[in-house]
Amino acid sequence: MRRRTAESIRLGVEAALAASIPQVLIPKLHERLLLRPGEAELGPRFVQRLAAMAGRRLPEDVKWLGASAFHFGYAALWGAVYALAYERRPVHPLAGRVLLGAVIYLATFTRWGGAVQTGTEKPPGRRSARKELVLLTAPFTFSLGTALGYGRGPRPWRGRWRTGW
């Protein structure tokens, strides 16, 4: 792996890990305003669902620990993907935000997305508009933080790599 590629991935992972904090907090705020308590806690429900599929029951603290590990690992993965995509085709951070948010939403919350396929979330047609709003908030909050955070890292500009945007 080229040094610049490794550095890009590191910056992408760092930006994504930082962005993963507001990704949880903002939907949690929306949950308090729009949904019943616990309805936006996708991570623990996902871990519980996977355990149930394996015929296991998990204590509450183990569900939250598993959800936290998955959350940060998933964030790191998407940060690396964003960095590699950006290295190949740089875009403005706001365009990157929209693209990354859309890809994450499609991979997670559509009929064929991971959360729906595991039974963690209902399919799109069976969710309320309020729930859909909360589910849209998470990937687009995360993608904004990742794109803006990464946008302050290296980028090609007139044939040279510079820091900042």
Image (tube, rainbow, N blue to C red):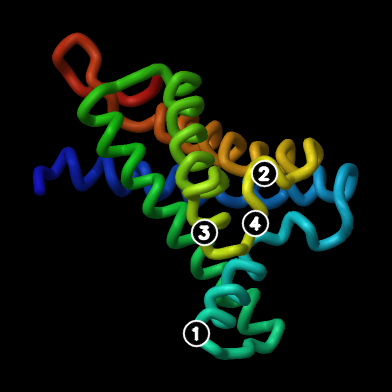
What's the amino acid at mark 4?
A: Glu
Question: Going 54% across and 43% down the picture, which residue do you hit?
Answer: 110
What's the amino acid at mark 1?
A: Ala
Q: Is residue 15 visible?
A: yes
Find residue 134 and report its image quarter.
top right
Q: Earlier in the sequence, mark 1 or mark 3?
A: 1
Q: Are marks 3 and 2 in contact (CB under 8 Å)?
A: no
Question: Going 18% across and 41% down the picture, which residue do you hit?
Answer: 5
In this view, the residue in front, 154 or 28, is: 28
Q: Earlier in the sequence, mark 1 or mark 4?
A: 1
In this view, the residue in front, 153 or 99, is: 99
Q: Which residue is mark 1?
A: 54
Q: Indicate the secondary structure of the residue bearing disc 3.
A: helix
Q: Which residue is mark 2?
A: 135
Q: Are marks 1 and 4 in contact (CB under 8 Å)?
A: no
Question: Going 50% across and 20% down the picture, which residue do you hit?
Answer: 94
Mark 3, other Cα within 10 Å: few <14 / some 14–19 / many ≥20: some
Mark 4, other Cα within 10 Å: few <14 / some 14–19 / many ≥20: many
Residue 73 placement, left or right of 64:
left
C-alpha separation, residue under disc 3 versus residue under disc 4: 8 Å
Residue 12 placement, left or right of 112:
left
Q: Indicate the secondary structure of the residue bearing disc 4.
A: loop
Give the mark toward the camera: 3 or 2. 3
Q: Which residue is mark 4?
A: 121
Q: Position of residue 30 (x, y in %)?
A: 81, 43
